[in-house]
Amino acid sequence: MLKIKHTTCTDLIVIALAFLLVLSCTSRKHDAGTYSSCTLASPNQPEVVIELKEDGQGLWKTPDEEVSFRWTVGGNEIRLHTRDGGIIIGKITDSSLEITLPGKRTFSCKKGQPGA
């Protein structure tokens, strides 16, 4: 009798983990894309384009450099995980991305190709 309960419990855990994996993949696919027209309250700011790829990888592009990162989403919160171990937290919606940088500076970006 105990063996049946243990197997059922294990099966439920596996099913729950599979369900969470499906949900996380769906969210990534939905949120993946190019976010451009990023603005900061500074007139001399270079253009920033952020690419979120479906595999959880991303690129932060400026005219001078590209920085790669990993990204995760939970609810409407997005976390950009840098190669150095830092985490940048922001908010994501169907059409925009808002990222708070150190020093309380905030970028607001619109989903869509640059110049669109």
Image (cartoon, rainbow, N blue to C red):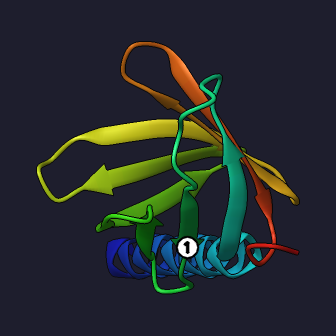
Q: Which quadrant of the figure has residue 110?
A: bottom right
Q: Residue 116 versus residue 110: which sits nearer the camera?
A: 116
Q: In which quarter of the image is the C terminus?
A: bottom right
Task: Give the vertical position of 81 relative to 89 (above or below).
Answer: below
Q: Residue 94 versus residue 75: which sits nearer the camera?
A: 94
Instruction: Give the left or right position of residue 32, taking residue 17 as reference.
Output: right
Q: Which residue is identified by label 1?
A: 51
Element carrying mark 1: strand
Image coordinates of residue 64 in percent, x first then y, are 33, 64
Residue beneath the point at 81% across and 73% down: 115
Q: In which quarter of the image is the N terminus?
A: bottom left
Image coordinates of residue 50 in percent, x first then y, are 55, 64
Residue beneath the point at 60% across and 80% down: 25
Q: Residue 77 versus residue 97: which sits nearer the camera?
A: 97
Q: Which quadrant of the figure has residue 16?
A: bottom right
> Crowding at label 1, few (<14), some or many (≥20) Cα neighbours within 10 Å?
many
Residue beneath the point at 82% across and 51% down: 93
Q: Residue furthest front?
A: 44
Image coordinates of residue 105 in percent, x first then y, are 52, 21
Task: Give the vertical position of 108 relative to 113 (above or below).
Answer: above
Amino acid bearing label 1: Glu
Task: Give the vertical position of 44 relative to 1 (above or below).
Answer: above
